[in-house]
Amino acid sequence: MNQPPKMPRREFLSNVAATVPSWLLFLSAFKPERLFAQESEKYDPTKHNYSMGVDIRKCIGCGRCADACKTENHVPREPFFFRTWVERYVIPVEGEVYVDSPNGGIDGFPEYKAESETLRTFFVPKLCNHCENAPCVQVCPVGATFTSQDGVVLVDASYCVGCRYCIQACPYGARYLHPTTKVADKCTFCYHRITKGDLPACVEVCPTQARVFGERNSNSSPIRRFLRFNDVKVLKSYLNTRPKVYYAGADEEVR
């Protein structure tokens, strides 16, 4: 109990003083938004809050959204990597629900021969939900996954170490490890487009306007009208991730 400390107090404090500034310098330099510099100098992320709406009743399963996303964001063309994709739901009168998404829906859907009478069939576009309480952000050990000031969940590739923690944590299966860069990749709402006032590629090419995008805080925004005039739901609401992608026309079969 009365043994002297192994390191004199003055020497200990001196070492701390020499070490702490280097960590403070690192933390001050860690501003993920720097790699997502706004295309317009007038863009202020604090004045925006983006969300997307999907009207399942309008989706025809053409897959143009998934194809446009791959082209716009240079997503690998292999059928294992998607930032957005389309799933087909087949609801039989009896039996289990059948769900498929061959090549993300880009090449269409083959005829499905049900064992029993089919009650209904519909298509559901999926993507990152840009959750306000995002599990991927919470588990990232290096802060590579973060939420921008305008509410978009992004990945700073220069910080990502490819640990896959965020991929495992995402309850929506919306992330993948890029086969070339070996870092996590996902939907960004086409961040490079929306900061210039353009729509995400998937929204722009949708022939039936099944996807809606806009400012959640603006009364005149398409997404505000979408939320006002539709009975919407979010996927897996019981997880309390607070998704920012809203679905209209979705029943309990949609997960």
Image (cartoon, rainbow, N blue to C red):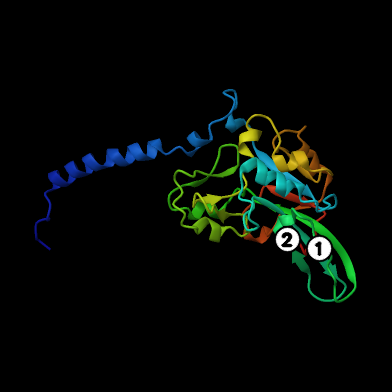
Q: Position of residue 155 (x, y in %)?
A: 53, 45
Amino acid carrying mark 2 in the image: Pro
Circle 1 residue: 110
Separation of disc 2 and disc 1 at Cα?
8 Å
Amino acid carrying mark 1 in the image: Pro
Q: Which mark is residue 251?
A: none
Q: Is residue 130 left or right of residue 204?
A: left
Q: Nearer the viewer, residue 8 or 230?
A: 230
Circle 2 residue: 102
The residue at 70%/58% (across/down) is 103
Q: Nearer the viewer, residue 222 or 37?
A: 37
The quarter holding residue 68 reads: top right
Q: Position of residue 158 (x, y in %)?
A: 45, 43
For residue 223, say whether it is visible. no
Q: Position of residue 119 (x, y in %)?
A: 89, 68
Q: Nearer the viewer, residue 190 or 134?
A: 190
Question: For mark 2, does the 10 Å Cα neighbourhood hold few (<14), some (14 to 19), or many (20 or more) residues?
Answer: some
Q: Secondary structure at mark 2?
A: helix
* Lower position in the chain sequence, tag 2 or tag 1: 2
The answer to whether marks 2 and 1 mark residues whose Cβ atoms lie closer than 8 Å is: yes
Q: Relative to residue 48, is residue 134 depicted above or below? A: below
Q: Relative to residue 141, is residue 39 depicted above or below? A: above
Q: Specify the quadrant that holds the N terminus.
A: bottom left
Q: Nearer the viewer, residue 5 or 236?
A: 236
